[in-house]
Image (cartoon, rainbow, N blue to C red):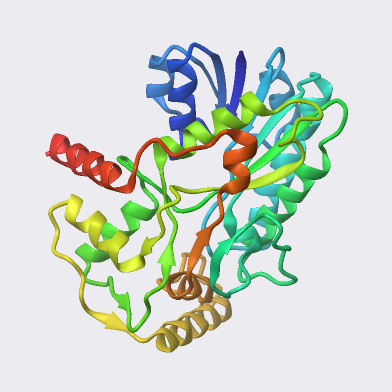
Amino acid sequence: MKSFVTGGGGFLGGAIVKALIQRGDEVICLQRGNYPELDQSGITAIQGDMTDQATVDEATKGCDVVYHVAGLTGVWGPHADYYHINVIGTECILSACKKNRINKLVYTSSPSVIFNGDDEENIDESIAYPETYYNNYQRTKSTAEQMVLAANNNNLATVALRPHLIWGPGDPHLVGRILERAKKRKLKLVAGKQNLVDTTYIDNAAQAHLMAADKLDIGSSCSGKAYFITNGEPRLMSEIINGILKSHDMPAITSTVPAQLLYMIGTISEWIYSLLRIKREPMMTRFIAKQLTCAHWYNLDAAKKDLGYHPQVSIEEGMQKLHDAFKDSQ
């Protein structure tokens, strides 16, 4: 297979590239930054803008499958910025697939596209998109996911994966933020909340993408559908946070903050940042407050049935790998 990956220099994109190389695929990837490690891996790494149609058209020539992983993440920022990357970028990918007659597209989405602020407990893919969103990341990822699924037809098979809270060695997002806030003594647990949360070890998230591509075909059972992807091991949020801290030889967090206070701080922060037009992300937002105080765990039956997805690395094994990587870096 000749595979094209957007965002190959990112955490998930890089893991997908590595998995593709390991199984012998020819890989071309496109990313905004310069990542020397990609050039050293023997793949074709292109530095460019995925919202430039000519660049995407040329880069995808001769490819069999596209993994559209890249996107603008975060919980704060102008709608125009998120729309340009997440929606216009996806439009360019879809157009290139059509022009170059590529018939497989695996899109990396997020469970946030269906998050409405309520607990999510054992929910499946039948849940509807909410009418309103907390931020522009949610809003534009939802638009892009629906575009991808609507593009499924007799010439292009599409599938969207919704991995939740991906983590592992080298993770700059979940792991990185927890460690950063703990070091600054700004990390607290939510008082009185016993909310269960699904997470996804990085190798499992990457393998889910390859499995989806392998199962995907015109008229296949997974074409035109979205799937939740997690480790399938719901844990308390406090257990996940303190597990990550323990893997880095840091003390557990025991101090707490009330859920209502957290949401109030997020609301006030958003108001102040909007009023003063502050571009950097607030320490707390309504979305983050809700994410920390709600349950998030999903039914994986559809992914198991249609994709053959079964997580290979457990949370315990993942935490050990995280600890081993930390020790090796010392």
The quadrant the N terminus occupies is top right
The residue nearer to you, when weighing 114 against 236, is 236
Residue 179 image position (x, y, % from top left): 26, 57
Q: Can residue 307 be seen in this view?
A: yes
- How many discs appear? 0
Q: Residue at x 34, y 43 (%)?
A: 314
The quadrant the C terminus occupies is top left
Q: Which residue is drawn at 76% across and 21% down?
A: 102
Residue placed furthest toward the right: 154
Q: Is residue 32 visible?
A: no
Q: In this view, does 69 lie to the left or right of 324?
A: right
Determine whether 25 is above or below 74 in the image.
Answer: above
Residue 92 image position (x, y, % from top left): 75, 35
Determine whether 192 is above or below 136 in the image.
Answer: below
The residue nearer to you, when weighing 155 against 7, is 155
The residue nearer to you, when weighing 119 against 144, is 119
Residue 299 image position (x, y, % from top left): 56, 55
Determine whether 299 is above or below 293 in the image.
Answer: above
Q: Which residue is drawn at 39% across and 23% down?
A: 36
| Residue 151, quarter of picture | top right
Q: Which residue is drawn at 59% across and 42% down?
A: 303
Residue 304 image position (x, y, % from top left): 57, 40
Q: Is residue 86 left or right of residue 111?
A: right
Q: In this view, does 188 lie to the left or right of 263?
A: left
